[in-house]
Structure formats: structure tokens, C-alpha cells
Image (cartoon, helix red, strand yellow):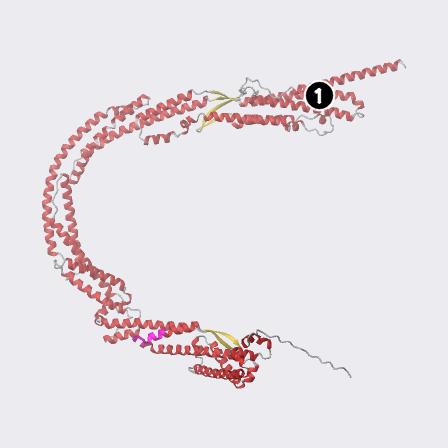
Amino acid sequence: MSDAYIADCVLQIGELQDFLTTYKNCNINLVKIMEKICDSPLIEFDIYNVFDIYVLRETIRNMETEAITNILEMYKEIIVYIIIVYEGFESYIGQMAEHWVKYVRRFDRLIEDALRLAIKATMQNMYKCVHGDGTMAPSPLIKMSLYLSDKNIIYLPTRNEIVDTFTTVLDEIVHILSTMPRLFQKFGLPAGGLKNFSDVIQTDADTNKLQSLIDNEVEYNLGLIHEHIRMWDPYAHIWKVDKDEFMEKYRQEGHTAADFDRLIINYSDLANAVQIQETFNQIHFITLNSSELKKSIIVHCSVWQTKLGELLRTITESDIDVIYAYIERSSVEAMTMPADLKELATAIATYERLISEIAPFEKTFAPITDQMTTLGKFEVELSSDMVTRHENIPVTWAEYLNLLEEAKKALELNKDKFKAELLEQAEVFKEAAKEFCEDFYNTAPCSSEVSGKDAMAQLKAFREQLNALRAQEQQIKDGLAVFNLTTPVNLDLQKMEKELEKLEEVWGLVYQWEESWEKYKTQTFWEMETDEMEENVMYLFRNFNRLSRQLKDKGWDIIDTTRVKVDAFRRTLPLIGDLKNPCMRERHWDRIKALMGVEFDQNSEDFKLELIMRLNFQAYAEDIAEISNAATMELNIENGLKAIREVWKNTTYEMQHHRGDMYKIKNVEDVMQFLEDHQVQLSSMKSTKYVEPFIKEVDYWEKSLGYVAECIEISLQVQRRYLYLESIFSGEDIRKQLPNEVKIFDALSADWTEITSNMYAGTNAIEACLYKPAPYLFNKLNTMVDNLDGILRQLEKYLETKRQLFPRFYFISNDDLLEILGNSKKPQLIQVHLKKLFDNVNKIRIDKVYHFKYYPSP
């Protein structure tokens, strides 16, 4: 082995040893850097520092920036050391690529763990700041101040500012780390499942848990702040109550000076209570400053005191104005002298009122003095004029009392003058009343020669004069009452007024009668309302009877004269009612014209009450009443006949198809009921004397309905016999045994078919029975009954011959025997009758037996 080779080996070994040393040193330095990153929290506070919120935010950002800068520097060192290691293996990197990737990923994960621990330490520091170390409460960190804003207590920084400061710490760190690449990204290696540093930190459970704990502590601290704010609730009325509204209400309630004094002192006490409250409070990690809030509340207390003082001053000034205004107004009223009695009474009442108001008004002086004292106590600014006016109140009031004494003397002088004038007026009034009564008794309307209208006008004039005298009398009484004097009642006027009232009542009724009579006699007869007329006339008649009894001593002939007229008209009212009877027909009016021997047109517009009275209808009142009554009764008959016509127009009996063109009667109950009812009605009509105008129609209906009843009755007899025989003659055996009767029955069938088809074709029961003139149908039906009875007799003889041949047929009825004979070729159908013919035989069995005779062949 040559020396050169050995020297080369030594050189190679030395280089390898140097690289190994470098490799180890790089790994050691990388681990140290990782440890340094672990020990590099992004945020760390001095426990003795207290920050404004904006300073705190800026401090946190500066700490984060500085820490990230240091971490990035260390990150660069890591890159340098890894590059050094890479350069040592660069010649063989292709052979050891897998080991190289694992090597880089191992340190990549170490950086991830170091960052996670550093950020966890950061969040722990933040949590310690807001929560404390577990043994002690957190140190002050944030400054907060309370303020009064718009009647509410607020705090600054606001809730959102505090929450944003702490809840965004982790988000900001994640955002900063998003710019820091992973080692595999830096060296262009595959990710191998590794995430970005920002994603790892954002999803780290411990870090997120710490962030949640920090958020909870912030919410807890804010809750404590709100609890502290509620401590100020007892003082809330100081700033929340509207001062102007309170002052308005307080003024309306009429409080005394003592009330104002107590309330003003109360606000001083409240201000002192607010002042002694703690200005600075340590609430968890927040230092709360209440100085601005206390200042605002104290200012409000001062405003309350100022406004109360101003209100008391305003009230006091108003009270002083009221006193001076009252004295001025009352002085004018007291010195106003009366010009007449009415004004004298007013002046006396005014003076008495002013005297009665002295004591109550003097009681208002002391409260005003108390108010002025309270204003001076609290040094409320007062004008010199207000002070002077208050001091002069006693002097001004004394002058006012002297003025009232002078007014009293002046009133006494006026009273004597007016009293003499009133007594003179009373005497003049007596004479005027006496003359008025004499004029009334001499000229008042009492005779029937005066019309009601004129009498009412005359009485109205008397009433107006009486009212004028009464007004004058009342005026004199009112004047004398001022002097406590009375005047006796004027008996002449009182008596005359009663007479006037009676005359007004009498002539009022007379006028009502005259107006009614004018209306009635010119009104068209058929437009008269007899009910209204009767009610009005009876009212007048009763009242005139009453007045005739009550005033018979007066000798007023107008009462009896009018009563006779009303009574005469009252007696004609039944006549008018009879003439207006709606049952009256033209024939009745013709009878009235014939009775009276005059001609008139009752439908003319000239036919009025005036014409009735002129033609002397009332002389024939009884006969007209009889004619009217006859009209009513005849109308009842007419309506009854009309109802009968309407009923029989559509009434028919029910029929149904039988066979071929033949029908049979099914139901006649309704028809028979109508027949019975209407025959009774027609009989009742014929029994009255009022049937004469309708006698022909009544006779027609009586005969027609009687004929229909007979036809229906005999038709039912024919139908019963025919239907009975029809089933018998339908058998061939009977038809052979009774050939003559069969011919008669067939002829009857043809007749019955004709009758029932015509009945069915009729639109009502009458047409059904009178399709040919009477008594065609009745005679034909009677003939059919006779023929059917003859057939039944021949049938009875035929059955008798059969019974004689076989006597046991006597045990059964004709119908059973006919059924046996009809079914003689059908033995099975006669089984039901055997037990009637033979004892102990219920039925027999009939078998067909076939006999075969054998003939052998020869």
C-alpha cells in the first residue's frame, strides 16, 4: 500500500469526520432553535400594567409582530442548517432520497409542535390575564369608564370593543402564520399528509379550548359590570324622569312651600350620596372609573334644585298677581252704583259676596310669605319688583277694606230711593190688573155665534196681555225681595186666569171640531178613514160631555151647541161605515137609490159627506144597514161558491189501468170528503134569505154534486161485482157451463170499458160523471148492477147443482168451490181444500202408474 493511498484515505476520513461533526452540530442547533420557539410566546403582559382598550390592542399587535419576526429569523436559521446538511449529502442524495425526505419531515413536525406549544403558551398568558392564576383574581388589565347618555348608563370601551379585542387573538395569530411555509414546501418535497401551520393551529383542540375559556371570562366580566351598573338603579329617577312634565304636574298638585323645601333638600342629600360612592372599582380584570357618571348625576340634582326654585318663584309671583288683580277687580265691582232695581239686587249680592271672600282671601297671604322665605333660603334670584309687591300686600289690602266700607254707605242710600219707587209701581199694577179682569169678563167669547178661529184669536190676545201683567208682577216681587218685602197674590188675576184656561180648553175643542168637519165634508167619500173619524169624534164627544157637566153653571151655550153637532155626526158614523162596506155591489147601491127615490153616482168625486148629509141618508140608516148586512152575507155565499168552483176544477178520483182500454177506480176518499163538505155548505146557503142572487148556481152545484155522489157510489158497486165475476168467467169450464151468462158478462165488459175510459179521460170528477148528459151514466150503471146480480143468481144455481151431486161441497164457500171446479184438471191445486171437505185428511198423494203388458212372440 503506497503512502499516497494512505494519505488519501486519511484525508477522506478527516473530511468525513468533519462532516459528521457538522451534521451533529446542525441537529443540535436545530433542536435548540425548536426549544427557543417553544419558549417564545407571542403575547406576554406585565401584571402591573393597565391599558386603555386601544392601547391594549396596539400592544397585542406589536407583541405579535415582534414575536413572529423572531420566529421567522429562527425559521431562516433552521433553513440554513438543513441546507448545510443537504450539501453534505448532495453527492449521494439520489441514493438516500427517501431518508432525506424523512429527515426534513421530522424537523417539519418539530417546527409544527414548537409553534403549537408557543401559541398555546400565548393563549395561556391571555387566559391568565383575564382569569388569574387560579389562586388569585386577575390583575387590572383594561380601563373602563361609566357615562350617562340619553337617560341610560353606558360604559366605554363598549361591549363589542372588549369582545373583539380578546376573541380575535387566535384569528390574528392564524392569519400571521398563514404566510409561513412548511419545510416540505420550501424544499419542494411531497406533503406526506402535513398541513399548513395556520391550518394546524386553527384546528388545535387545546388552543381552541383556551380561546373558548377566554371568551367565557370576558362574558363573565361584562356580566359583573352590568351588576355593578344596577347598583345605580335607586338613583335612576334623577335622570330618567322628565323634569318639565314633573314640574307641570307638581304645580297642578298645589304643593306648599314646605313641600318645595323638603324636595330641594332631598336632591342635596341625593347628590351627597352619589358623591360618596366609590369612584374606582376593580371588577375582575377591568378597572371601572365612575367619575364622569357621578358628575352627570350631581349635575342633574343641581338642575332639579334650580327648576324647583324657578317653579316656586313662578307660583309665588302668580299668587301675588292674583292678589293684586283681585283687589283691583273687586274695587271696581264694589264702587259700581246701580241704575235700576235689577242692578241694585246685583250690587247688593256683589257686596255680600265680596264681604264673604275677605276671610278666605286673607288666608292666602301666609303661604305666600312662606314661599318667599323658602326662595330666600335657597338663594333663588328674585326681581326687586316682586319683593316690593310682596311687602306692600298688607297696605294695599287695608286700603281695599276701607273702600268696601264706602261702598256699603253708597248702597244704603240707593236702596231707600228704589224702595219708594217699587211701592208706587205696585199700586199702579193693582189698578191695571183690575181693569184687565173687568174687560175680560165683559168681552170674552162664550156664544156659539162666534167661530172657533175668531174665538181662539181673541183668547190668544187675552193670554198675551195676562202674560205681560204676570211679568210685570214678577218684576215688582223681585224688586221688593231685595228689601225683604213681599206683596200678596193678586186674586183677581188668579181667578181670571182659571176662567181663561177653561175657555181656551172649550174653544180649542170647538176649533178642532170645526176643522175636522171642514175636512170630512169636503173629502171624497171613498178616501174617508172611518176609524180615524170615529176616534176623533168620540174624543170630542167625551170631552164636551165632561165640560158640559163641569161648566153648566157658566152658561156658555157654545158647549151644548157644539156637543149636539158632534153627537149628531157621531150617530151618522155607522151609516158611513155601512156605505163604505167593501161587500157592497152595484145591485145594493141600486136598492139604496130605489129606497131613497134619488139618483147619485157613488163612484163620482162629488160623492162626499156633504152630499150624503144633504140627500138625508141618515133618515134611511136602518134600511141601509140591512142592505149593507145583506151585502156582507151575500159576499160570504159568493166566496163559498167561488171556493167550490176552484176545488172541483181540479178534483178527481184516482184511477189506474186494469187491462186493455179498461180502468178501475182506485181511491175516492178525497172526492167523497169534498162532496160531503160542499153538500153541507150548499144546504146551509139555501137555508138563508140571502141566497136569492145565487139560487141558480147553488141549485146547479147541489144537483151536480148529488149526481156525482150517486154515480161514484153505484160505480164502486159495479166495480166490486165485475172484478169478482171477471176472475170466475176467465175459466173455460165455467164459460162452458153458463154460456148465456157469459154472453151477458161480455156485453157488460164492453160497457164497463166504455164507462171507465170516459171517466179516466175527464179532467175532474164532474166531467168524469157527466161525459154524457145526466142521467145517462146513472141509468146505465143501474142496468149493469141488475145484470150482474142476475149473473150472480145463475152462478149460485149452478153451484147448487154441484153441491147436490157431492154434498161435501156444502162445507166450503162459493169461492172455494169455484176454485175447485176451475182446477178440476189440476189435482195438485185442490189439495188446500181437502181438509175442509174431509175429516182427518190433510192431503193425498197422487202418483202416475204405468202398466206394461208383455206379449211373448208366437
Q: Nearer the viewer, residue 578 or 10?
A: 578
Say which residue appears at 11% left-offset and 50% top-offset: 492
Pointer 1 residue: 78
Q: Quadrant of the C terminus?
A: bottom right
Outermost residue, front side = 840
The location of residue 309, given as percent across then percent down, is: 34, 25
Query: In the image, which residues are magenta?
Result: 680-691
Q: Is residue 461 left or right of residue 48?
A: left
Q: Amino acid at mark 1?
A: Ile
- In the displayed structure, 503 sits above or below 262; it is below
The location of residue 138, given as percent across then percent down, is: 54, 20
The location of residue 363, given as percent across then percent down, is: 24, 28
- In the displayed structure, 165 sits above or below 750; it is above
Q: Is residue 681 magenta?
A: yes
User: Is residue 829 visible to the viewer in this orientation of the structure?
Assistant: yes
The quarter of the displayed image where residue 485 is located: top left
Q: Main secondary structure of the magenta part?
A: helix
- In the displayed structure, 430 sits above or below 125; it is below
Q: Is residue 545 magenta?
A: no
The quarter of the displayed image where residue 526 is located: bottom left
The location of residue 25, given as percent across then percent down, is: 74, 17
